[in-house]
């Protein structure tokens, strides 16, 4: 029943207590003839001592049932290894071929909070506003361009094709005489490259319109003239020239770092009516001019991109102070793809690095290839499983799971292979046959891998508590991958090992060693597989039980003796305690005081901050702090909305959060809301007046008027100018509003007329910030807005949350007359996302630690071992923040997601050591820890080296997600192996339980029932 020799009372032997063996002894079976020694593997086994399990010989009917419930599996693997070796991958391939993998339409889908009330209200508003924009885009409303309207070729500007150019001065003197001359040469040179495709001044004049720049804005082309114009500029001129000058430009001195310009590309092309006519077809022809054909999308020497690069390089040689960047939307693809291709090569390099390290560790190309095969198949099979459980697509972020499984998969392989190699050095009851070796190896490796797999899956699944679909599904998908890797490692990989042992290692032994034909060959086999050979390459004589000296590899010897002896020194052990306590306290303090929330959205952090490509994207998309927005440029807005249910604002049934496009749901309207009534018309005007009084609302530069965008106020002014009554009759309100929208007038309040409404933004902006949705003659949704004064790019929570709170209070104040409005801002989704991520980390990490502790208790059956192991994991997390703060220090989307799986990533190594410690048959804590270091030290160290090598390659990536992911994995694993190999052994030597102290009896009893009829201090059933 699992008793070990140290637990026997007095001088009693196992035979005295357990009685005689139930099967014939080994000697009785083998007495007739001693087999000839043909090689190391066929050496006769010595008699088993009385206190060991009797080795069941081959041929017995019940041998396949020996060793508990898994004995039949081990018998099958050893007897027919090719069955599962072929069958398991075949079934996996059939599943993948039948089910397939989900499509990959998503890149940034599912990255917002979804279930909080603020997120639901924001999504409901966006969905209702989209319905309004669709409804308002009718022939009766203004259209920006009639597709049938004809224009002469190249008389319109094609903004999507025009070339934006940014100039940055290293010295902060972008308007110096030298830099101004360089900018003129670049702008004029780009104009010449575009040639006849520039925007022309008129249908009868082929002259190109001058590039839009500070030169065209001021009418000056020399440094002194431009600076003089800046000195005398009015507020309106300064506001307009923000389009061309950097945010830090000093108008009084002309000192600044940035300027920008735009080379106008004209349209329509010959044979087209206007720039909107067959827009995609025209776009393809423009792209041909840029020359980015082919799979890579990279430019060719005769295209615009290459010629412009040559001009920039030439100017760079003449003027080292000026940095020139240029881009247009057709240029995004080749530049973006080029960076992605470079990072993909590094990622593939990580795969090869793991394969090479596995090969060096296990000593076999066949086994390393099989290891990589099961890792890759686990990932692909998980994709099929992902589809089976009802997911329609997978996301870009889920691809990163491959790097998690590289480390976990390699670690599992090392655990199994180290146990397999160590099985040869065990007593003959274990090492005497392939079956007994596999029984011992499989039992030990299965238990160790089951513990780490369970803990990792538990931690990964906890990402599901975060209300961000892409993060929640990332953890769930990663858990599926980890499960399949575990399945392959315990079901399929043993077959590979047996085939390798029978036909590769044994072939080496029976060939060059047994025949004594090649001493060198035999020595190579011996080095890789710990074969017993004499000097010169001869097979060693069979060793009898108790005579064989301990045969350890260099790393095993280091961990079992060198490291162990170091930690046995009390002074050194106390130094370890002090050092690690200081590290943990320092990391925790940094986490509490220095870690801040990011102020960058995903679109601003695709690539690293140091990347020129990311800077170019930010400049092109208007996300760069180098330039301020003008008063009529992009602004965030606050909104007060009516008609949507406050408490349950959106119906998400039938939507898929990771699906392509906007699958946010359908707004739920309040059927009882009367938005046609006279009282509502007056109420909405009152709301607009209150918006004008909010401190967060921007003021127009020209006259300091608050930028409130309110269709009802404009409608009221229009009615007054036309001498019409207001409020209008409820039954005719919708008809009257549509008449107002269709009247191109110039009086006060005219729809989308800058002179009448005072709205300086584009027509489209008006409809996005104020409007009404109708069903028949009834208004079901209405909203009004105000432009916000905080800069468009600002995302810092401490800055934007007061603005959000101010608008929420306005909505609460206007909650009267049964109207139930609510207010949001354009930053609501970001605020909800940040709160959701932080709450997820604060909630998820402690739960993950509790899960890890629970699994440790179930795995070890010992409360003290589990507590010390959990303390080690807490130390790893605290230490990680030291490198996190040094490297970045800001929590964003990726960082919060990665922190969620920190426990799962850091638990493996200490769990392996803890489990091995508790399985040691020795009594003293120090002895048990020595066994643990000797048995598992090499496995966890090899697993750590593999993961560090793979993640280290990602430091060279330009994409932020790869870089941050590599950095996260690298430092978590680095701290994990340091704590596991130093702090945990020191603690166990100092405070670890001796014997069975701290054991939880029911759990230990359960262990004995499932340990396949054996424990580490017993021999395994014998067999072939």
Image (spheres, rainbow, N blue to C red):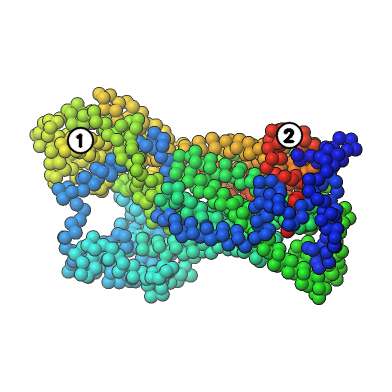
Which residue is at the front of the view, 815 or 206? 815
Q: Residue at x 78, y 72 (%)?
A: 512
Q: Position of residue 658 (x, y in %)?
A: 41, 48
Dot 1: what SS?
Answer: strand
Eyeballing the image, is 660 above or below 788? below
Say which residue label 1 marks.
779
In which quadrant will I find the C terminus? bottom right
Q: Tell me which numbered mark, 2 or 1, is placed earlier along the sequence.
A: 1
Which residue position holds label 2?
999
Tell me: 650 left or right of 578. left
**How many other residues sit within 10 Å of disc 1, few (<14), some (14-19) or many (≥20)?**
many
Residue at position x 35%, y 50% in the image: 661
Judge by depth and name the residue closer to the eye, 442 or 47. 47
Residue extending farthest to the right is 11
Q: Of 93 and 577, which appears nearest the observer? A: 93
Let me know if residue 411 appears in the view.
no
Instruction: Give the quadrant of the N terminus.
Output: top right
Q: Residue furthest left?
A: 723
């Amino acid at each position: 029943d699992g008793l070990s020799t140290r637990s026997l009372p007095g001088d009693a032997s196992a035979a005295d207590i357990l009685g005689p063996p139930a099967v014939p002894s080994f000697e009785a079976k083998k007495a007739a003839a001693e087999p000839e020694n043909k090689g190391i593997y066929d050496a006769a086994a010595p008699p088993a001592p009385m206190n060991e399990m009797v080795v069941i010989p081959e041929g017995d009917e019940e041998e396949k049932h020996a060793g508990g419930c898994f004995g039949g599996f081990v018998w099958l693997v050893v007897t027919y290894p090719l069955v599962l070796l072929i069958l398991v991958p075949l079934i996996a391939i059939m599943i993948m071929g039948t089910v397939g993998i989900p499509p990959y339409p998503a890149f940034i889908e599912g990255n917002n909070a979804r279930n909080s009330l603020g997120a639901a209200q924001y999504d409901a508003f966006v969905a209702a506003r989209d319905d309004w924009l669709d409804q308002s885009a009718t022939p009766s409303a203004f259209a920006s361009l009639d597709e049938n309207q004809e224009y002469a070729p190249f008389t319109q500007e094609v903004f999507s094709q025009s070339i934006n150019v940014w100039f940055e001065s290293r010295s902060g003197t972008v308007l110096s005489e030298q830099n101004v001359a360089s900018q003129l040469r670049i702008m004029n040179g780009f104009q010449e490259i575009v040639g006849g495709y520039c925007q022309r001044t008129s249908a009868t004049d082929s002259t190109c319109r001058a590039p839009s720049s500070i030169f065209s804005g001021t009418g000056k082309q020399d440094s002194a003239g431009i600076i003089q114009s800046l000195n005398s500029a009015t507020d309106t001129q300064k506001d307009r020239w923000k389009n061309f000058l950097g945010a830090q430009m000093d108008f009084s001195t002309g000192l600044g770092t940035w300027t920008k310009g735009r080379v106008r590309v004209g349209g329509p092309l010959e044979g087209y009516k206007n720039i909107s006519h067959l827009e995609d077809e025209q776009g393809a022809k423009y792209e041909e001019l840029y020359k980015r054909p082919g799979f890579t999308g990279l430019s060719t020497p005769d295209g615009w991109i290459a010629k412009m690069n040559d001009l920039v390089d030439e100017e760079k040689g003449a003027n080292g102070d000026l940095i020139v960047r240029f881009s247009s939307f057709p240029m995004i693809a080749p530049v973006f793809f080029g960076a992605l291709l470079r990072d993909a090569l590094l990622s593939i390099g990580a795969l090869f690095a793991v394969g090479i390290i596995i090969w060096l560790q296990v000593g076999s190309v066949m086994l390393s290839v099989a290891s990589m095969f099961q890792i890759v198949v686990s990932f692909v099979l998980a994709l099929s499983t992902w589809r089976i459980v009802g997911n329609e697509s997978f996301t870009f972020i889920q691809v990163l799971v491959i790097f998690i499984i590289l480390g976990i998969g390699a670690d599992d392989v090392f655990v199994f292979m180290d146990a397999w190699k160590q099985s040869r050095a065990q007593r003959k009851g274990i090492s005497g046959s392939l079956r007994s070796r596999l029984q011992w190896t499989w039992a030990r490796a299965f238990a160790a891998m089951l513990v780490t797999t369970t803990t990792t899956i538990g931690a990964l699944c906890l990402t599901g508590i975060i209300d961000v679909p892409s993060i929640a599904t990332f953890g769930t998908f990663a858990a599926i991958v980890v499960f399949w890797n575990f399945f392959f490692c315990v079901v399929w990989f043993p077959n590979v090992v047996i085939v390798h042992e029978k036909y590769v290692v044994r072939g080496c032994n029976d060939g060059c060693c047994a025949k004594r034909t090649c001493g060198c060959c035999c020595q190579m086999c011996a080095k890789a597989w710990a074969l017993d050979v004499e000097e010169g390459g001869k097979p060693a004589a069979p060793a009898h039980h108790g005579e064989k000296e301990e045969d350890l590899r260099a790393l095993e010897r280091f961990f079992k003796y060198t490291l162990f002896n170091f930690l046995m020194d009390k002074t050194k052990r106390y130094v370890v305690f002090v050092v690690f306590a200081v590290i943990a306290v320092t990391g925790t303090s940094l986490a509490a005081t220095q870690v801040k929330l990011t102020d960058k959205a995903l679109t601003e952090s695709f690539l690293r901050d140091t990347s020129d490509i990311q800077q170019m994207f930010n400049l092109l998309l208007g996300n760069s702090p180098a330039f301020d927005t003008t008063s009529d440029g992009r602004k965030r807005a606050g909104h007060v909305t009516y008609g949507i249910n406050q408490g349950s604002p959106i119906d998400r049934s039938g939507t898929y959060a990771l699906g392509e496009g906007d699958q946010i749901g359908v707004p739920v309207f309040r059927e009882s809301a009367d938005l046609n009534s006279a009282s509502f018309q007056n109420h909405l005007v009152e709301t607009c007046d209150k918006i004008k009084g909010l401190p967060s609302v921007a003021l127009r530069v020209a006259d300091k008027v608050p930028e409130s965008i309110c269709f009802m106020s404009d409608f009221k002014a229009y009615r007054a100018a036309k001498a019409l009554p207001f409020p209008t009759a409820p039954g005719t309100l919708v008809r009257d509003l549509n008449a107002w929208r269709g009247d191109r007038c110039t009086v006060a309040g005219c729809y989308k007329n800058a002179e009448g409404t005072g709205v300086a933004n584009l027509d489209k902006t008006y409809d996005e910030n104020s409007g009404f949705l109708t069903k028949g003659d009834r208004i079901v949704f209405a909203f009004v807005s105000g432009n916000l004064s905080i800069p468009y790019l600002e995302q810092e929570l401490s800055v934007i949350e007061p603005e959000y709170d101010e608008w929420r209070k306005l909505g609460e104040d206007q909650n009267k007359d049964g109207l139930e409005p609510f207010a949001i801002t354009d930053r609501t989704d970001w605020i909800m996302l940040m709160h959701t991520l932080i709450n997820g980390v604060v909630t998820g990490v402690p739960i993950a630690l509790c899960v890890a502790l629970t699994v440790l208790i179930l795995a070890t059956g010992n409360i003290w071992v589990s507590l010390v192991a959990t303390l080690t994991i807490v130390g790893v997390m605290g230490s990680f923040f030291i490198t996190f703060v040094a490297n970045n220090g800001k929590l964003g989307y990726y960082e919060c997601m990665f922190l969620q799986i920190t426990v799962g990533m850091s638990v493996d190594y200490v769990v392996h050591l803890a489990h091995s410690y508790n399985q040691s048959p020795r009594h003293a804590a120090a002895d048990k820890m020595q066994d643990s270091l000797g048995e598992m030290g090499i496995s966890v160290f090899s697993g750590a080296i593999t993961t560090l090598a793979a993640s280290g390659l990602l430091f060279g990536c330009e994409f932020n997600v790869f870089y941050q992911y590599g950095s996260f994995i690298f430092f978590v694993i680095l701290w994990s192996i340091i704590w596991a190999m130093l702090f945990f052994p020191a603690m166990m030597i100092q405070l670890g339980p001796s014997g069975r102290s701290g054991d939880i009896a029911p759990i230990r009893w359960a262990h004995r029932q499932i340990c396949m009829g054996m424990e580490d201090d017993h021999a395994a059933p014998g067999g072939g």
